[in-house]
Amino acid sequence: MNHTVKTLIDKLEQNGVLNRDEFVRLIDSRTGEAAEYLFGKACKIRHAVYDHEVYMRGLIEFTNYCKNDCYYCGIRRSNREAERYRLTPGQILDCCAAGYGLGFRTFVLQGGEDPYYTDERMVEIIRAIKTQWPDCALTLSIGEKSRESYKLFREAGADRYLLRHETANAAHYEKLHPADLTLKNRKRCLHDLKEIGFQVGCGFMVGSPFQSTECIADDLLFIKELAPHMVGIGPFIAHHQTPFADEKPGTMELTLFLLAIIRLMLPCVLLPATTALGTIHPTGREKGILAGANVVMPNLSPTSVRKKYMLYDNKICTGDEAAECRMCMHRRMESIGYHLTVSRGDHRGTI
Ligand code: 5AD
Ligand code: FES
């Protein structure tokens, strides 16, 4: 194997970080052989911390209304073709009940930035879920809010919050979002969430339009600095009703390489093998686990709304019942020697 690449991987393993130039060099000069070497190290660390366990999160996509207009996203407000829906609190609780029966001990409420779900309505839902299933962790993924709103959600009992930073390079951020969304505010949100006591997750898309290797290096340095509990990364995939309709997708190969780098940077991090990764390759999620990921997020949304939460084209699992996804995921993990566990799946570290 190329000597410099090996040296960089060894250095990354030792120091948990590289500088910007080194990250760029490592990523740009990677080979299949280097990737195997890196995956070996990532798996070793992953097994030391989480053994062969895979944590599962039940994803409930409760609204596809969104006031934002991100250029990459299928449920952006300018997409007049998207058929909008909201689940009622009763439907959300039904999803949790079904999920609990299937062994889920973490529920993720994800939605567009939907003004209908005021703080009061969110607090009511959070309280209801945490009262009925006090042994479960509740994760929110509902976008940018004020510090005060985040505090209310935390006080109501929410445990975790996912908010991908999307790109840590300000110029790149402007190419993916309209002017009313800024990297500065995104970072403010993540820092507020952490200070308030949430377990936080950031993340980015691999191969998003205009993404350079330098952008990815900035993402990795930002992740190191924030030291989040979770990092969600997956390939960009075009949605045909967005301005990025004709852009090419991110690759599985680079996504896997980055998952392994992130495992070396943050040994205890909760790292999902995402649905987008499963969408670009039939066994993408399995390969993600073998590159160092330790979380999967099967869908618990009612099948009647699945096809409407289309962030990108050809999203998998849109026709399957929660129980089918659960069984399918079980088989997939067993096929590579890993096991889904009935557990909240908390972060096993000190950050
Ligand atoms: N391709 C891949 N991922 C996407 N997301 C949004 N649109 C796309 C797309 N076209 C991701 C964003 C967002 C998360 C919920 O889904 O990173 O934060
Ligand atoms: Fe922003 Fe969808 S419009 S993530």
Image (cartoon, grey):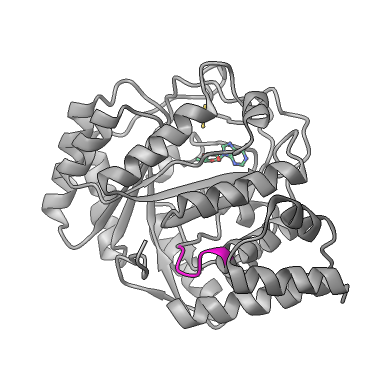
Which of the two residues, 67 or 189, is positioned nearer the viewer here? 189
Residue at (69% x, 36% y) in the render:
238
The stretch in magenta equals 265-269
Give the main secondary structure, helix, strand or loop, of the magenta stretch. loop
Viewer-closest of 37 and 85: 37
Q: From the top left corner, tell me how far across and down residue 156 is, in percent.
A: 16, 42
Q: Does residue 206 appear in this view? A: no
Q: Residue, x 47% and y 72% (percent of image)?
A: 330
Question: In the image, what residue occupies the spot 79% across and 74% down?
Answer: 6
- Report the side of 285 relative to 196 (left or right): right
The quarter in which the N terminus is drawn is bottom right
Q: Position of 190 compared to 205: left or right? A: left
Q: Look at the image and say whether residue 303 sits in the magenta stretch.
A: no
Most extreme residue toward the right, as rendered? 2
Rendering coords of residue 80 (x, y %) = 55, 16
Residue 145: x percent and y percent? 34, 28
Residue 346 location, quadrant: bottom left
Is 44 rendered above or below residue 141? Answer: below
Q: Is residue 144 left or right of residue 93?
A: right
